[in-house]
């Protein structure tokens, strides 16, 4: 059994075609070529935190993977990262533990950002006038960084609740090569951006009202049954609503919230892997409003852990 450190993992990542590997995972999932049980979850109140356990395998593959990732939101007050975790790779043939990836949730952050880039690749309008980022944390920065190869747009408006955090985030985003402005009013993002990514742990909608025609929203912060970043009315008015996993999104995230109020029906939802595979239509015109709900699927963890393990050799 190999133990892979965070340093080894970070060194190996640049040699891996993450978008290609994770796209394959989404396609396998949507075509029924994977086994992914429901998400395991632990929720803590004092201090507030959550642990997600995601696991599964691709059929006729060599490995199965169990991922444990936590978020304890008051950790930064103690000078600690809010996220932690690891990925465990086992043999499908014998059940033997092949590798422990001590990634400290880094791979979870990266595979989440890559999924956002994949989603934009298939659903964003061809001409992105301005990118809107909702949130000022690690994922806000990573989502924007991974959009670099997907769109030529370099104009960004970032929203947050704290001006100090907004300023720090804008500085980091500028260093990536973007021209960045900030706002404390989410309506500004909706008014001027046609590619919007939400990255918060909000439990009440931040995006409300109408979006510009042609806007795409990737909502990736709402990964539990009680989180919500996007008002259900936006999904109701959208021309296309996409889930990374329909079964998961029936229970958690933006789609689950919209289903509660009958704003949408299950029959309207299209799965991301089906669009990637060409089995379902994605964006078909530039004036469509599209919304993708990313709750995080185990196939992402399977694909990124396998790719890193094989790259390290």
Image: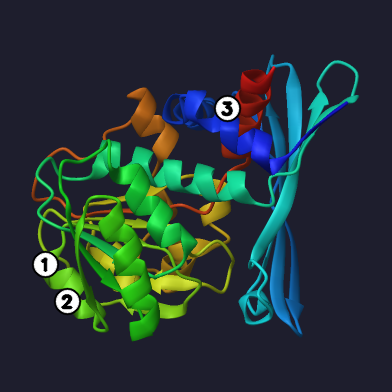
Looking at the image, is 23 positioned above or below residue 146? above
| Label 3: few (<14), some (14–19) or many (≥20) C-alpha neighbours in 10 Å | few
Of badges 2 and 3, the one in the foreground is: 2
C-alpha separation, residue under disc 2 versus residue under disc 3: 41 Å
Determine which residue is flagged by label 3: 32
Most foreground residue, 256 or 180:
180
Looking at the image, is 233 positioned above or below residue 68? below
Most foreground residue, 75 or 72:
75
Label 2: state its secondary structure: helix
Most foreground residue, 178 or 118:
178
| Label 2: few (<14), some (14–19) or many (≥20) C-alpha neighbours in 10 Å | some
- The answer to whether residue 68 is visible is no
Determine which residue is flagged by label 2: 188
Indicate which disc, 1 or 3, sits on the residue closer to the N terminus: 3
Q: Position of residue 261 (x, y in %)?
A: 42, 74
Q: Which mark is residue 192?
A: 1
Q: Position of residue 303 (x, y in %)?
A: 59, 29
Label 1: state its secondary structure: helix
Indicate which disc, 2 or 3, sits on the residue closer to the N terminus: 3
C-alpha separation, residue under disc 1 versus residue under disc 3: 39 Å
Q: Quadrant of residue 204?
A: bottom left
């Amino acid at each position: 059994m190999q133990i892979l450190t965070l340093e080894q993992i970070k060194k190996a990542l640049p040699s891996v075609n993450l978008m290609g590997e994770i796209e394959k995972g989404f396609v396998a999932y949507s075509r029924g070529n994977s086994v992914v049980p429901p998400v395991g979850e632990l929720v803590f109140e004092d201090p507030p935190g959550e642990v997600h356990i995601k696991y599964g395998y691709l059929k006729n593959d060599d490995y199965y993977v169990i991922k444990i990732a936590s978020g304890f939101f008051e950790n930064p007050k103690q000078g600690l990262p809010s996220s932690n975790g690891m990925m465990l790779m086992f043999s499908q043939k014998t059940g033997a533990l092949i590798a422990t990836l001590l990634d400290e949730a880094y791979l979870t952050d990266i595979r989440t950002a890559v999924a956002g880039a994949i989603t934009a690749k298939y659903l964003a309008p061809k001409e992105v006038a301005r990118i809107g980022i909702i949130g000022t944390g690690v994922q806000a920065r990573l989502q924007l960084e991974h959009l670099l190869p997907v769109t030529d747009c370099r104009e960004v408006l970032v929203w947050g609740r704290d001006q100090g955090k907004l300023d720090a985030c804008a500085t980091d985003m500028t260093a990536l090569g973007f021209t960045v402005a900030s706002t404390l009013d989410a309506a500004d993002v909706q008014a001027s951006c046609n590619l919007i990514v939400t990255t918060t742990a909000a439990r009440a909608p931040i995006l409300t009202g109408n979006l510009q025609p042609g806007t795409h929203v990737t909502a990736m912060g709402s990964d539990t049954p009680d989180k919500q970043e996007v008002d259900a009315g936006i999904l109701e008015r959208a021309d296309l609503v996409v889930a990374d996993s329909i079964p998961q999104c029936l229970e958690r995230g933006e789609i689950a919230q919209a289903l509660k109020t009958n704003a949408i029906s299950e029959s309207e939802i299209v799965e991301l892997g089906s669009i990637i595979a060409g089995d379902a239509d994605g964006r078909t015109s530039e004036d469509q409003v599209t919304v993708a709900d990313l709750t995080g699927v185990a196939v992402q963890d399977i694909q990124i852990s396998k790719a890193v393990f094989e790259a390290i050799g």
